[in-house]
Amino acid sequence: MRIATFALAALAAAATFPALGQVNININVPGIVQMAPPPPRYEMIPGPRPGQVWVPGRWAWNDRDYVWRGGYWQQARPDYVYAPGRWVQASGGWRWVDDQWKPGKQKHGKHSKHDHDDYHDDGGYHCPPGQAKKGRC
């Protein structure tokens, strides 16, 4: 009987004190990743292929972590210039902006320095936009 009385008293005492705890609320905005992408990887572009455009590798988010997706060749589109996708800061996180084909002639089947800012004529090194300014490339 004494144990039952003690248990009942302990239960009543616990009920009178407010629960001390911390509540975390995470609001997930679709398409927004809270963690910044890792620095870009060095990627050697294979030799040029006529009628093809190099799509550079990128960090992709798989709902848990970033994973590297290697670059690949894609069929060029006549009268269009390829603009690679990129990670941009948005809504307190990071959002991937898909690559695009922009109207305009591509010069001699090769990239020009104006086609996109992250292509260099020094052997094909790829540095995503804005990363060089941050000293990451």
Image (cartoon, rainbow, N blue to C red):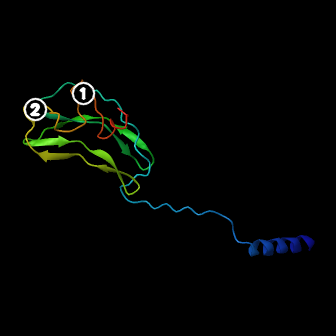
| Left or right: 70 in relation to 22 | left
**Marking on residue 124:** 1
Left/right placement of residue 51 relative to residue 61 reads left
Horizontal and vertical percent position of residue 130:
31, 41
Relative image position of residue 98 (x, y in whole percent): 26, 48
Residue occupying the point 46% across, 62% down: 27
Residue 8 picture location, percent across and down: 83, 74
- Find residue 127 and report its image quarter: top left
In-image side of 72 versus 135 (left or right):
left
Quarter of the image that includes the N terminus: bottom right
Q: Quadrant of residue 2?
A: bottom right
Q: Is residue 76 left or right of residue 64?
A: left
The residue at the point 23 percent across, 33 percent down is 119
Q: Give the secondary structure at mark 1.
A: loop
Q: 10 Å neighbourhood of mark 2: few (<14), some, or many (≥20)? A: some
**Residue lying furthest right:** 2
Q: What residue would you read off at disc 2?
A: 109
Looking at the picture, how far across and down is residue 14, in whole percent? 77, 71
Pick whichever of labels 1 and 2 is earlier in the sequence: 2
The one nearer the camera, 54 or 102, is 102
Residues under labels 1 and 2: Cα distance?
A: 15 Å
What residue is drawn where x is 13% and y is 31%?
110
Q: Nearer the viewer, residue 65 or 4?
A: 65
Q: Amino acid at mark 2?
A: Gly
Q: Regarding mark 2 in the picture, which secondary structure is present there?
A: helix
- The correct choice, above or below, for 89 with respect to 18 in the image is above
